[in-house]
Amino acid sequence: MRADPTGAFAIRPIRREDAPALALIDAAHTGVSKPEWWDDVVERHVRKGAKGGARVGLVAVAGKPEKVVGYVLGQVRAFEFGSDPCGWIYAVGVSPARLREGIATRLLEEARKRFAEIGMKLIRTMVRRDDVPVLTVFRNEGFAAGPYVELELALTEVGR
């Protein structure tokens, strides 16, 4: 476990028992409760991450007893349209009561270190273009537009 320089929280690897807290943080931001999904995701990170695998799962904890106040999840991916293997951050969240305390920044810094330790030279993520707070966090961490453009097709439009 690595303490934040301020001592306000610490960063540690994700554990199975963290899933309910991650689900609550996510639901607070998205308005959608999905505890089964979080149980599954956390289980995969614990199982594969413990073996030195290609997954990064970290939580920020504060207080005694420990309370999860943030998380970051990522994995190595290399199959999208011929892209080289790289780290992908696919989930990051901070308890609404603890926003603007540097928790997301520290989690992303630690994820960056973990990806570098397993040989990754690049990290990608995807953010809604109208989600200014999340875009700001990633841009402040040095993320910028990459060489790919995300495209989508609404299935209700197929066949028109």
Image: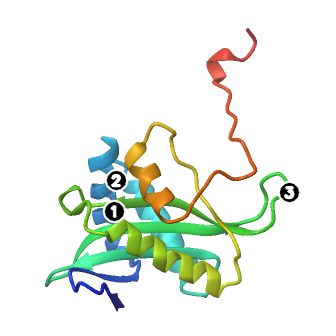
Task: Look at label 2 and name its amino acid.
Answer: Asp
Quarter of the figure with the N terminus: bottom left
Q: What residue does disc 1 label?
A: 22
Whole-Å distance between the Cαs marked 1 and 2? 6 Å
- Report the amino acid beneath label 1: Leu
Q: Which residue is mark 2?
A: 26
Image check: 58 left or right of 66? right
Residues tagged 3 and 1 counted as in contact (Cβ below 8 A): no
**Closer to the camera in the image, 137 or 20:** 137
- The answer to whether residue 82 is above or below residue 123 is above
Please give the label number shown on residue 147: none
At horizontal 46% and vertical 61% (from top left) the residue drawn is 140
Of pointers 3 and 1, the one earlier in the residue sequence: 1
Q: Position of residue 35 (x, y in %)?
A: 35, 55
Which circle, 2 or 3, is nearer the viewer? 3
Alpha carbon separation for disc pair 3 and 1: 32 Å
Q: Relative to residue 67, is residue 20 drawn left or right?
A: right
Residue 83 picture location, percent across and down = 81, 59
Spatial distance from mark 2 to mark 3, Cα to Cα? 31 Å
Residue 100: image x %, image y %?
A: 26, 61
Amino acid at dot 3: Gly
Callout in the foreground (3, 1): 3
Q: Are marks 1 and 2 in contact (CB under 8 Å)?
A: yes
Residue located at (70% from left, 35% from top): 151
Q: Earlier in the sequence, mark 2 or mark 3?
A: 2
Between residues 51 and 9, which one lies in front from this camera angle?
9
Q: Residue, x 86% and y 57% (percent of image)? A: 82
Indicate whether 73 appears above or below 90: below
Rate crowding at label 3 as few (under 14), some (14 to 19) or many (20 or more) other CA atoms within 10 Å: few
Circle 3 residue: 82
